[in-house]
Image: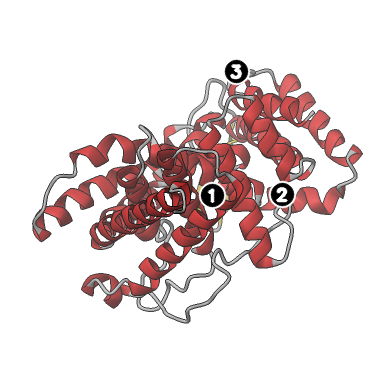
Amino acid sequence: MVTLKLIYLIVLAITLFLPRDPQVLLLLLGAHVLLWLASGFGIAALWQSVRRLRWFFLVIFLSYAFIRTASSDWYALSLGPLSVSINLDGLQLAALMLTRVLVLVIASAWVRKTAEPGEFVAALKKIRIPETVAISVDATLDMISGDSGTGGGGGRGRGRGDGKNTGKKLGWSSLRSGQLDAFTGLLERQLGRARTRVSRHHPQVSEQQANDIAIVLTVGLVVMGLKVLQVMPGLPVAPGHKNLLIVPLLLFAARATHMPFGATAAGLTTGIVSFLLGYGKFGVLEISHFVVPGILADLLMPLARARSRPGQLVQFALIGAILGLGRFSANFLVIVLAGAPWTAFVFYLPMLASQVGFGALSCLVSPVVVNRGAAAATRATEQRSKSTAKERTPSE
């Protein structure tokens, strides 16, 4: 049943781009609202799922209010000495276009809230999601749930990721001077926990696959852990500020895994877990927020060959800026889904600039995380290999 729900959600996300008949869109919206209510979730829970869209809705309405459409009906609104012309047909068109977004968000929330984590992971395997991703999603949800003491299903899990609070703060001065002990310490602890988890629960996998699963799992745990890691002091707060740490993690996955698309797997794992825990506001499209930069990391990381400090800063700044652009993908997809005019992108330019800017600034973090993380992964693999060899050696 969960598999069918997941397939339906994927098909819906694709086909919602097609219908333009208002009656069809309103019928779809009504059907999903009734489905939500029939599942016993109530109006309050429905509002909780869609209220974060209010600013996006405002942007779309403003975008349509002042542009000429196929059949424009202008209304002159007097504001004291000023007179503003508003396109009423444009506002009606905006409402219909946003109905698409509402349908997808409600459907995503319904699938998430009606599926247990274990069922969702089983469904992922049935639709041929790579085993590394399915195992990592299951393990991330389980470990976060264990840390926070709450379920990781359709709720708002808030696990710490490592079950500890180091009390250390990561600020601008730390980034600039390369003092990243708080972050690299978190990364190494999570890598150790991931190794232990894989060895205990999946002893049948090969050394290389165990390494890849552990790294993908580590990225998922650390990204979820960033929800509570104190990154604010001395750091400018703006959309995309977490790119300072997320971009290096994806580059680390691309460098340290043996599989061809390790960062893509890490991004897909993180995106699915984030979706299941209810983060983000665009439903299933939020997964692209991590998958697209993961793909870009896999494609660009082989080009990162500079060894000098200035060379590494330049290469990682360029790569980080491109990954920051990819982190804007969820917003881009939902703007396209809404059929918004080009003016909507103008409203989102500051957010896009912030994503790209913080992605470029991640060059202060990426060399340390990629090099130290890859070294830690190599040491862990060698230790596991030695342990396995000892276990296989017959006692004399």
Residue assigned mark 3: 18
Q: Of callouts 1 and 3, which one flags the residue occurring earlier in the amino acid sequence?
A: 3
Residue assigned mark 2: 49
Label 3 CA crowd tier, 10 Å (few <14, some 14–19, many 20+): few
- Display colour scheme: secondary structure
Number of numbered discs on residues: 3
Which residue type does callout 2 highlight? Ser
Which residue type does callout 3 highlight? Leu
State whether residue 65 appears in this view: no
Residue drawn at 85 percent across, 49 percent down: 43
Which residue type does callout 1 highlight? Val
In the image shown, does 205 or 65 lie closer to the viewer? 205
Residue drawn at 79 percent across, 32 percent down: 32
Q: Are marks 1 and 2 in contact (CB under 8 Å)?
A: no
Residue drawn at 42 percent across, 59 percent down: 242
Describe the element under mark 3 as helix, strand or loop: loop
The residues bearing labels 2 and 3 have C-alpha atoms spaced at a distance of 24 Å
Residue drawn at 73 percent across, 50 percent down: 153
The circle drawn on residue 198 is 1
Residue 20 placement, left or right of 83: right
The residues bearing labels 1 and 2 have C-alpha atoms spaced at a distance of 34 Å
Residue 87 placement, left or right of 108: left
Q: Position of residue 304 (x, y in %)?
A: 19, 44
In the image shown, does 261 or 244 lie closer to the viewer? 261
Describe the element under mark 1 as helix, strand or loop: helix
The circle drawn on residue 268 is none
